[in-house]
Structures are given as C-alpha cells and as structure tokens.
Image (spheres, grey):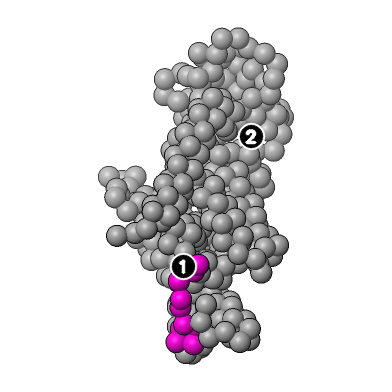
Amino acid sequence: MFKYFEPNKIFSITSRAPKYVLLVFIIILCIGLTEALILSPEDYKQSHSVRIMYVHVPAAWISLGIFSIITFLSIAGYIFKLKNFFLISKSLAPSGLVFNIIALVTGSIWGKPTWGTWWAWDARITSMLILVLFYILYLVAWRIYGNNDKVFKITAIITTLGIINVPIIKYSVDWWNTLHQPASVNILSKSSIHISMLYPLLIMTAAFALFSLLIFLMKYNTELIKIKNKGLDRL
Amino acid sequence: MYGRKVKLRFFFIFLILLILSFTVFLILKSLEENVVYFQSPTEVKTLAEIDDKKIRIGGMVKSKSVLIENKEIKFIVTDFKNEINVIYAGIIPNLFAEGKGVVAEGFLKDKSLFFATKILAKHDENYMPPEVKEALKEE
C-alpha cells in the first residue's frame, strides 16, 4: 500500500550527518550564547530579564515550525501513502515537544518578574498549552499503534486537528486582549525590536533549529535501523 | 494524474479542515467575552450591568495619576477614550509605571471605580537598549 523507499540509501547519508550537524550546532550555539548573554545590551525597561527572550522566542518558533512540518508531512503522507513521511514526522515530534515545554517554562520564569505572575490563562499561553497536549497526543498515538498500519491514519487526523491551533497561537495576541505582548519580530511590517537584540535572537533560532535537526537525525536513524533489523531492505 | 482514492483522501482532509475551522471559529466567536484576558475601560463603560463577579481591566496607567497614601495606591487606567479609577493595596510588580500597560484584577464598584485585588504589569512589544530609548526621547 505504501510506496517503496530504500532505507539503505537514505541511511548511508543520515548515519554520517549527525557529527557534522553537532559540530555546526556547537559553534552556532557558542556564538549565540555569547551574543545573547554577554554582548547584547540590556533592555531599557526590563533590564537583564530580556535575556530570557533569547531562549523563549526561538523555542516557541521552533515548536510551532515543527508542528507545521509534521502536519504537512502527515497529511501528504496520508494522501499519497508515503510511509517515509510518517517516519520523518515521528522523528521530528520529540524535539518539537521539548521546545514547546521550554517556551512555556521560560515564559513563566520571565512572567514572574515582568508581569508579576507565573501563569495567566490568556489566549496565547493557553493555546501554547494546548499545543503541548497535541504533541503528547501525537507521541502517545505512536506508542500505542506504532506497530500497526492504523497509526498513519490516526496521526494524520491528530495533526489535522492540531494545526487549527497554530494560526490561533499566532494571531491570539492580535485578535483578543491578552497579557502576552504582540509580536515584536515582523516579516512584512517593521519590527519593534532593536537590531542589536534581533541578531542574537536569530542566531539562537538557528542554533535551536540545528539541535532539532540533530535529534531528528538520531531518531530517524533509529527508525531506519529498526526497519533493517526486520530483514527488509524495502518497505 | 492521481488515482481516484488519492483525490478522495485529499477531499477528506480538506473537508475535515474546513469543518474544523468553522466550528472553532464559531466557538471562539461565541466565547469572545471569556477568551479576552481583560476588558478596556471603554468596554467596561458599555457593560449592561455591574455584578460582583471578579473581572480584569487593562489599559495604560495615566501619566501623573499614581497616588500613594498609607498602604493604598490609587491610579487611573485609561485607553485614551475612557478612564477608570483603581484603588489597590498590596504588592505591585516592578514594571508597574505611569504611561505603561497594566492589568488589574478585582471588582467594579461602579463604572468608574475599581477595587483591585491583584495588579499585573503588561509589557509591550518594544525591545531596545537604554541608549536608544534616550535617543528617542530627545527627538
């Protein structure tokens, strides 16, 4: 039912990639942390607690990005019956979940000194919490149905349901009154973050993306080895 | 080009997304009052009645309106159209300041007087170093 793909060919590339990705990740992370923690200026209003933002915002971006990729791959995989897409999605999900939790925890740590509360049930924060639940639901579905072809349909449906939440997260701060501030970094209009703070933010985002790629490659290799061990060289 | 099954599956996912978007839209639209974290002074003015339920109001702390007497702090929350007087006794967050955003949780006495039980500072989307802020002020 699923189109053929050759794990051996892919494996010959993905098994060698992690060490290079790890090297680039460490370099970028060092530059990013130096920029974010030492070289970048403090904020005029919140002073040094602005530095939490360099972890919080990239983590939130990556978790949203990974969920979008997972959804796209799962839906395309479901429509065209491409098993490989599901394996890629499965391998991407854990780092998405971890970054989502990091975004919530760092947001909470930032919220206490800034807002005066650890947690607020405003639209942005609540919808991010719902995203965590969808990530967990997705991963639990793999745990339960992992060795059954049902898993492809179930995970495609879960991501389809969850993707509705992504534009809600993005626009919650514009649609409703929220305690969370609106976006500071805009692609189409002018950003309200100073350029000296934007650079460390973008470098940290690159570092987190590389970390996700690294974890993804490791997970994906495991999946390929599992297939090999079953004595199949084609699916 | 693609088989009938592929087209059907595509249609199936498309329908799910369509139905889901409409459902979520309707739910959020009807729950709007509960989704918002706080109400602005203008929204408070248009309230039909005042009950003794706990609500949150938010806006800017009006310049030169903060008054500290004994253990009480009084200030005015404004959205530049309407204003509400707020009375509060307790800990205020560090970032609470005149001309900055604030969210107050508490009870309405009437449409222009609010007894707060908790004050949260609202941070805006502007991030810049102190020198840039100074430069902006001078302009």
What residue is disc 1 on? A82
Host chain of mark 1: A
Locate residue B4, reporting x and y percent.
38, 54
Residue type, label 1:
Leu
Tell which of B83 and A202 is nearer to you.
A202
Left or right, residue B69 beside residue B57: right
Q: Magenta region: which residues?
A: A1-11
Q: Quadrant of residue B52?
A: top right
Residue drawn at (66%, 69%) of the image: A147
Q: Is residue A33 visible?
A: no
Which secondary structure, mark 1? Answer: loop
Residue drawn at (59%, 78%) of the image: A223
Residue drawn at (39%, 61%) of the image: A198
Host chain of mark 2: B
Left or right, residue B127 beside residue A104: left
Labels 1 and 2 touching (C-beta < 8 A): no
Q: Is residue B79 visible?
A: yes
> Counting other residues with Cα less than 10 Å from the Cα at mark 1, is it few (<14), some (14-19), or many (20 or more)?
many
Left or right, residue B55 beside residue B42: right
Tell which of B15 and A117 is nearer to you.
B15
Residue type, label 2:
Ile
Which secondary structure, mark 2? Answer: strand
Which residue in the rendered view is the most extreme toward the top?
B49
What residue is disc 2 on? B119
Task: Say above or below: A25 vs A85.
Answer: below
Task: Say above or below: A220 vs A82.
Answer: below
